[in-house]
Amino acid sequence: MKGNDCKMIEFDRFCELMRGQDGFRMMDTSQVCMDTIDAGVWYDMYHKAKGVNIYSFRKTFIMRWNTDISNYKLSEFEDLLFEQEIDGLYFDWSIWDYQKARIGDRFFMIRTGKGRHGIVMRGTISGIAYPDEDWSGKGRRVYYIRLDPSCLIHPEKAPVMLTNEELSKYLPNFNFESGHSGELVNDSTAQILEDIWQGYSYRVKEMVEKCENEGCYLMK
């Protein structure tokens, strides 16, 4: 990967390209282990590698959670939030643009409805969309997709949160308050969202270091 682009190369060619790099180890004939590699070194190898380029490989979706009408309650979210680990947790959530979603795509979940609005979850899509019963009971044809969260944020208790109001300052033409769940955003919007998120993460990290994790709901 380089940014949002991907280059598909054969495994043997990748191993040959990586051989001799610090932090790269062959485990067996089909598995490797890698430490963090300097971005400049990685991009240099990306350009040297011979393979098939796939541009705009990773998409970004906005999942919406209106707690006024959703059958998924805040209490259920809290049960998972206060677990010791979130590794292995997953959610199956409705997705509108299901035909465009692929495993590995990013998602941000936006909470609306009564209470504080903003990003409450971030992670990756880890399954293929499938049809199932309509969560609202209206008999619609609804598709769901599996989400693997890497971060959960309590909308009412988090001391720092990326609110819809703040998001709209950077993306005034995007409607964070209403719309379908599982909406694909364009690449420029996705990049701005990622930049906003990184800035938010740095703010939270600094706050946690100061208060020694007290009151922090950024779990991972």
Image: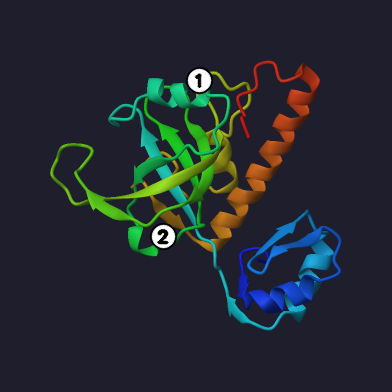
Q: Earlier in the sequence, mark 2 or mark 1?
A: 2
* Horizontal side, residue 104 vs residue 26: left or right: left
Residue 109 x %, y %: 46, 40
The residue that appears at 78% across and 29% down in the rendered structure is 206
Instruction: Single out the mark in the foreground, 2 or 1.
Output: 2
Image quarter hosting the C terminus: top right
* Horizontal side, residue 150 vs residue 73: left or right: right
Residue corresponding to mark 1: 156
| Three-letter residue code for mark 1 | Glu
Can you see residue 179?
no
For the residue labelled by badge 2, is the local secondary structure a helix, a strand or a loop? Answer: loop
Q: Can you tell which mark lies on residue 148?
A: none
Q: Is residue 68 above or below residue 109?
A: above
Residue corresponding to mark 2: 101
Give the quarter of the image for residue 158: top right
| Three-letter residue code for mark 2 | Ala
Residue 152 x %, y %: 54, 32
Q: Residues within 10 Å of mark 1 (few under 14, many from 20)?
A: few
The residue that appears at 39% across and 63% down in the rendered structure is 100
Residue 41 x %, y %: 83, 67
* Horizontal side, residue 167 vs residue 75: left or right: right
The residue that appears at 14% across and 40% down in the rendered structure is 138
For the residue labelled by badge 1, is the local secondary structure a helix, a strand or a loop? Answer: loop
Give the CA separation, mark 2 to mark 1.
Answer: 30 Å
Pick the front one: 47 or 175 = 47
The residue that appears at 43% across and 26% down in the rendered structure is 77
Q: How is the image coloured?
A: rainbow
Pick the front one: 171 or 119 = 119
Can you see residue 34?
yes
Q: Residue furthest left?
A: 139
